[in-house]
């Protein structure tokens, strides 16, 4: 347990610039988090209702499904609890680099290299002066865009589902800095520190 906590503190310091991660059931949006620094790169909420809260945030927690079932590990995004088929929107303008339209997850053989716990999902790259950010949208039921598509912030890209290693309908929304500019560090980011309070801001 001590080692897990030490690793988590190190990870947090390296990737979150020592800013406390958002707690579950807190309204999401950078403006609602005391002490959150101003960001040169921000995103809109991936759903149309910025008041939607999550049952899991960017934190250490025990997985209940999938290949890591029962293990205490890092949850690299935010899970938004929404009904099946809720429309999902591009959080920022960019290029779709992954549009996985098939659910290849096999609960009987989750360790198989062909078994993807992300289910149907989309990854979008967003070039910026900080480097190349990504936004990721997992466990979708249907995709509306394909690989290589150029999307604008707010474009509809798919619908929520429970594909992959999911035990209920939700949107897992994650962010990372994949290709950092000089002086920046690559790694997972807490989306709550980048989401603007209103989708239309």
Image (spheres, rainbow, N blue to C red):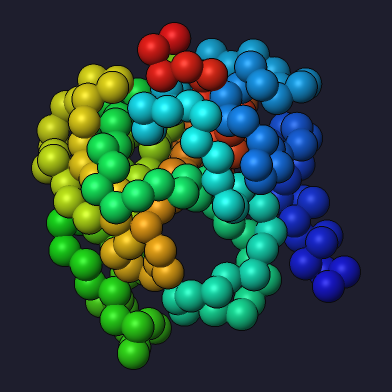
> Where does the image place residue 147, in percent across and percent down from the top left?
14, 43
Determine the residue located farthest toward the top in the rendered image: 201
Which picture quadrant has residue 29?
top right
Determine the residue located farthest toward the right in the rendered image: 2
Q: Residue at x 79, y 51 (%)?
A: 9
> Where does the image place residue 126, in percent across and percent down from the top left?
35, 27
- The answer to whether residue 97 is above or below residue 3 is above
Q: Is residue 10 left or right of residue 38?
A: right
Determine the residue located farthest toward the front in the rendered image: 83
> Where does the image place residue 125, in percent across and percent down from the top left?
32, 34
Q: Residue at x 61, y 80 (%)?
A: 70
The quarter of the image holding the C terminus is top left
Residue nearest the viewer, comparing 168 with 41 = 168
Q: Is residue 168 left or right of residue 163?
A: right
Q: Is residue 185 left or right of residue 11?
A: left
- The answer to whether residue 141 is above or below residue 27 is below
Could one spot residue 181 in this view of the protein?
Answer: no
């Amino acid at each position: 347990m001590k080692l897990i906590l030490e690793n988590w503190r190190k990870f947090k310091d390296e990737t979150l610039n020592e800013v406390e991660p958002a707690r579950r059931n807190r309204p999401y949006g950078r403006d609602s988090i005391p002490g959150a620094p101003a960001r040169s790169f921000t995103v809109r909420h991936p759903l149309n209702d910025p008041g939607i809260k999550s049952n899991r945030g960017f934190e250490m927690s025990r997985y209940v499904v999938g290949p890591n079932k029962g293990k205490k590990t890092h949850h690299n995004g935010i899970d938004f609890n929404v009904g099946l088929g809720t429309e999902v929107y591009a959080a920022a303008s960019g290029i779709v680099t992954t549009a996985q339209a098939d659910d290849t997850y096999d609960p009987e053989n989750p360790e198989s290299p062909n078994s993807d716990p992300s289910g149907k999902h989309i990854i979008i790259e967003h070039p910026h002066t900080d480097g190349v950010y990504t936004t990721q949208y997992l466990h979708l039921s249907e995709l509306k865009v394909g690989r290589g598509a150029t999307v604008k912030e707010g474009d509809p890209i798919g619908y929520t589902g429970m594909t992959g290693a999911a035990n209920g309908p939700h949107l897992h929304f994650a962010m990372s800095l994949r290709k950092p500019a000089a002086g920046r560090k690559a790694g997972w980011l807490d989306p709550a520190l980048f989401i603007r309070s209103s989708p239309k801001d």
